Structures are given as C-alpha cells and as structure tokens.
Image: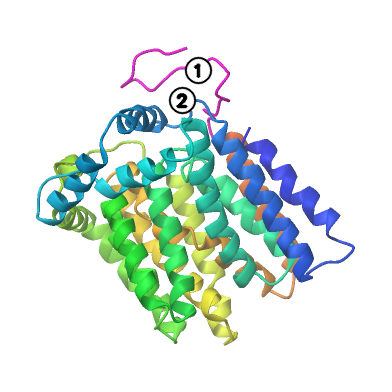
Amino acid sequence: MYSLLFIFPIVLYFITKRKPDTIRSKKLFIIVMTLVLSTVSGLRGLGTGIDTYNYYMNFETIQNTSWFMLISNITDYLQGANVTDPGFFVFVKIIQLFFSSFYVFNFFVALLITSAIGLLIFYGVEKISGYVLSYSYYISLLYWNIPNNLTRQSIAIALMVFSIFLILRKRKMSAVFLMLFAILCHRSAFLGIIPILLLYVKKTKWTFLSIILLTPLLFLLGQEFVNLLVLISDSERYLHYMDSETSARPLAYMLEMFLFYLMGIGIWKKKYVMNDIQRVSYSSFALSVAFVSMLWVDSDLLRIGMYFSIFGVVYIPLCVEHFKKHSWVIYIIVMMLFVGRSVLRPENYQFYWEKYELSDRYRYYE
C-alpha cells in the first residue's frame, strides 16, 4: 500500500504543471496529499504497526474513564507521580466528545500531523517539483511510523511544528502552552524544544558543522546519552533502554541519513539566504543525523530522532534544488532511493476490514 502512495504526488505534479509554483497549485497539492494520507491512515487495521492495537485498547478504556480521573492523573503527574503521558488520555477524551470510532480518531491524528507537515512544505519548499520530493521522503521514511504506529508522538510532533509557527507569528504564550501539552502527551516531546531554540540561531553554518563533532561523540557515548534521556524521562517504561542489546541495526537508514547530511554542505558553502522555516529545517534535520548514532544502541530509538527528521520534508528539496548542475539527475536518484526503500521494506499495512495478524505480544486477532 505504501508504495502505491507515490503515485499521488507524481500525478499531482503533472496536474499542476500547467500553472506550476502558484499559490493555488501549491495549496491544491498539499490539501489533496493531506486528505489522501489521513484517509489511508484512518482506514488502517489494528495489525498495522506494533502499537496500533495497544492504542485501540487505550481508546476503549478511555471511553469508560471519567473526566475527574483524567484530570487527577494530570495533577498527580505534575506533582511527580509515575503517571504515563496523561495529556494523551485527555486528548483522546476530547476527541471522543465528537467521535466514538477509533478509526475516525486515527484519521484525526493523521490529519493533525499531515497538516503540520503541509505547513512546513508550503512555507519551506519553493517549487512544486520539490513538493514531490517532500512527500516521497515522508512516505518512504516516516509515514509508516508517524502516524501509522506512534500515535502519541505524532500528536507531540504536530504540536511542536504548530508551536514554531506560533512563535513566528509572535504568539509565544500559545506556543508554550502547546509544547507543555505536547510533553504531557509524550515525555519525549521535551526534545521538540531544540528545534524551537534553533529558530534563534541565525548562522546555520556553525550548527551544521557542529554535527561533524557531535555525531562521533554520540557513537562513542551513545549508551550513556540514552541513559541520561531515560533518567530525564523519569519513567519505568524506558528502563529497558539502559541495558538494551540490539543485533538488527538499520544500517541502510543510517547510511541514507549521512548521505542526506552531505548533500546539505553545498547550501552553506554558497551562503544561500533561507527564510525562517528553511533555516530551522536545515539545522534540525542536520541534528537528526547525530541522533542516528543512537540506533547503534537500540534500533527502537528511531522514534527519538523523528522530532528532527520530520524537517527532512524541507531539507531534502532545499538541497536538491540548489545543486544547479545535474539537479535533475540527483532528483531522479533521490526519488529512486525513496521508492526503492518503500518497495523493499516489509509492509504490514492492512485496511481495517482485512484479516490481519497482530504482533507477537498480542493474541491472534481476526
């Protein structure tokens, strides 16, 4: 199913080709892709992704949970109690005021994250041809996880992106509120503060170059850094990362990220003038390369780097479009890389009406 999704941005490119790079064409492109990706995510079965069935059970439990209990969980959490992400349960309860279907809830979460991505693309990517790259990158490397597996982080990442736009519109208190709620939805969202801080770093060259030093350091001290993150999270759920052993490292993904990083060197060499979204995307994606080193500790930590790799929807076309010479050759190679990765990766997507098999930690379900 994921491989078929590449058809949509390519078809939209040819549909909008008569009037390329106009505001109307760009908005049409983003609206259609947002609705398509949200619909596919909303129709996914409980066997799609390791965590979807767990979120389904949480959804059913929350329907029978009182508002008093949910608010009490938040106050207990703020007082230091070991309560798991109470903001997410409040978020679900709010959605349930309007919809009682888990599949509609999935559609809404997908609409939230794809709308945030659409904003990044609209303000950060200059050409429609770049939009094809942006959505191809997202479908290939992120969509199967965000939102089709990691629901809480999808919400947190979307709120982080919205916070960035609020800050750019001088609405800092609203941004602070969104980020606090994002952290209540998932503790890892405190990492989303870093891209927000990068808004205030004007010289992206030094941020980009610092990754050269930071990456090998995290490779050497990766386990210690992971242990620090676990201690900051103050949650027993993540203690297993402190003595994690993994044999299945995503080497292809790690190599891809390093290659994308190298593509960005030409940007600061040419002293290209970037707008605020391009600048924060450039620096944040470069930082995601440093977090790739944590996959050497545990491949499941891929989710941590998504607070930064999400900005690849701007970074990738930004780099490709400014190669000037041989840009279309590089464009085609990158597209082939995205499509090839999606085709070769084992796919576990099923629609909700199809028969499916759950992860080993669940019983067999039809």
* Amino acid type, mark 2: Leu
User: Which numbered mark, 1 or 2, is in the foreground of this view?
Assistant: 2
Crowdedness near tag 1: few (<14), some (14–19) or many (≥20) residues, C-alpha within 10 Å: some
Residue placed most toward the observer, 315 or 184: 184
Residue on which disc 2 sits? 46
**The magenta stretch spans residue 357:** yes
**Is there any visible trace of residue 337 in the rendered image?**
no
Query: Dominant secondary structure of the magenta stretch?
Result: loop
Q: Residue at x 90, y 63 (%)?
A: 18
Residues at marks 1 and 2 touching, judged by CB atoms closer than 8 Å: yes
Residue stretch in magenta: 345-366
Residue at the image point whose x is 43% and y is 42% from the top:
95
Q: Is residue 66 above or below residue 141?
A: above
- SS for callout 2: loop
Q: The disc labelled 1 sits on which kind of residue?
A: Tyr
Q: Position of residue 133 (x, y in %)?
A: 66, 57
- Give the left or right position of residue 360, taking residue 26 as reference: left
> In the figure, residue 275 lies in which quadrant?
bottom right
User: Residue 321: where, in percent of width, then height?
Assistant: 69, 71
Could you tell me which residue is drawn at 33 percent across and 19 percent down? Answer: 362
State the image coordinates of residue 290 (x, y, percent, origin top left): 36, 63
Q: Residue 317 is drawn in which quadrant?
A: bottom right
The residue labelled by disc 1 is: 356
